[in-house]
Amino acid sequence: MAEREKLAKISELALRSRRDGLTRLLPPLGEVLRGSLTERYLTCGNPDCKCARGERHGPVWYLSVTLDQAHRAGCTVPADQVEQVRRWIENYHQVKESLERISDINRELMHRQKAKNKKRKNGAK
């Protein structure tokens, strides 16, 4: 709510400029990935393996994505793709945050347009 109050104090031109700036700063949309990247160390179950003595295998990088409340998908990520996956996940968070801010600005602009239309309508009577 405090963000809405801040936007209400900014001129319409400044709001439009801020919105345009946010859209220019978006990362390439083809390079976004929703999910969580985790590092895992695993045991294989072989009693003669080093992991049976506590030296686990890894790291193994794992991408996990929540599809809905009951379903999750995941896969291992090859070590040579970990940095790319991290970048894509960060891009996703940046896009999501920017979209929320753009949406806030658009709601404020819509609210102002509605108020202008109401004023015109009441002034015409």
Image (spheres, rainbow, N blue to C red):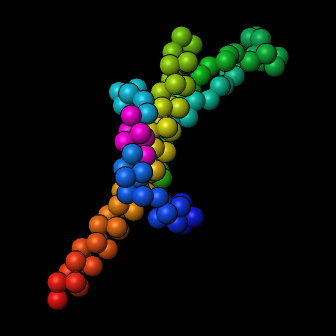
Residue 40 falls in which quadrant of the image? Answer: top right
The residue stretch that appears in magenta? 18-24
Residue 62 lies in what quarter of the image?
top right
Tell me the quadrant of the picture where the N terminus can be found.
Answer: bottom right
The answer to whether residue 19 is magenta is yes
Q: Is residue 40 above or below residue 71?
A: above
The residue drawn where x is 39% and y is 62% is 108
Q: Which of the image's four quarters has the C terminus?
A: bottom left
Q: How many marks?
A: 0
Q: Is residue 6 visible?
A: yes
Vertical placement of 90 versus 47: above or below? below
In the rendered view, tell whether residue 116 sits above or below residue 103: below
The answer to which of 107 and 121 lies nearer the viewer is 121
Residue 16 % position (x, y): 36, 50
Residue shown at 28%/72% (left/top)? 116
Residue 49 in the figure: left or right of residue 12: right
Q: Indicate whether residue 106 is drawn in magenta.
A: no
105 sits to left or right of 51: left
In front of the other: 59 or 109: 109
Between 79 and 93, the one lying in front of the other is: 93
Residue 75 seen in the figure: no
Instruction: State the residue lying farthest toward the front.
Output: 123
x and y, in percent, of residue 95 in the image: 44, 39
Q: Residue at x 35, y 61 (%)?
A: 109
Most common SS among magenta residues: helix
Residue in view at x 57 percent, y 30 percent: 37
